[in-house]
Image (cartoon, rainbow, N blue to C red):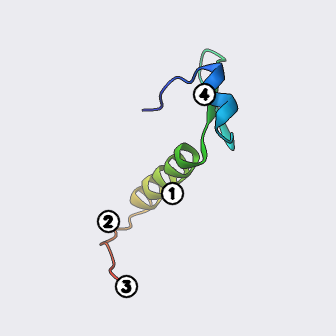
Amino acid sequence: MMTKKTRTSLESESRVGFRIHSNGEVEMLTEAETLALILRAFREGMRRAGWSRLAPTFH
């Protein structure tokens, strides 16, 4: 779940993404929040397509 940001905290962080809620509210996202949202969407799509959960790899 994304946290609400105040105007001051938004100005100090780089804003790289946004999310539009069903009520029309626009939420600005940090780089970490944007990456987490994208990865979650990819994993959900792969799961729905029948891919098994990917095991963690150690390099």
The Cα–Cα distance between marks 4 and 3, rounded to whole angstroms, is 36 Å
Spatial CA distance of label 2 from label 1 is: 12 Å
| Amino acid under disc 3 | His
Mark 4 or mark 3, which has the lower sequence index? 4
Q: CA distance from mark 1 to mark 4?
A: 28 Å
State the residue position of label 2. 53
Q: Earlier in the sequence, mark 2 or mark 1?
A: 1
Q: Amino acid at mark 2?
A: Arg
Residue lying at 64% horizontally and 18% vertically, measured from the top left? 25
User: What residue is shown at x 34% (from left), y 70% (from top)?
Assistant: 54
Residue 43 coordinates in the image, percent (x, y): 44, 57
Instruction: Name the residue carrying label 1.
Output: 42
Q: Amino acid at mark 4?
A: Ser
Which numbered disc, 3 or 2, marks the residue that appears first in the sequence? 2
Label 1: which secondary element: helix
Residue type at mark 1: give it.
Phe
Q: Any mark on residue 4, and which?
A: none
Instruction: Give the CA distance from mark 3 to mark 2.
Output: 19 Å
Q: Is residue 3 above or below residue 52?
A: above
Residue 51 falls in which quadrant of the image? Answer: bottom left
Q: Mark 4: give few (<14), some (14-19) or many (20+) Cα within 10 Å.
A: few
Do the numbered discs 4 and 2 sit on residues whose CB atoms are within 8 Å?
A: no
Q: Looking at the image, which residue is at 37% across and 85% down?
A: 59
Disc sitting over residue 59 in the figure: 3
Residue 33 appears in the picture as rendered = yes
Residue in front for this viewpoint, 40 or 4? 4
Which is nearer the N-term, disc 4 or disc 2? 4
Q: Please provide percent x and percent y for residue 27.
A: 62, 27
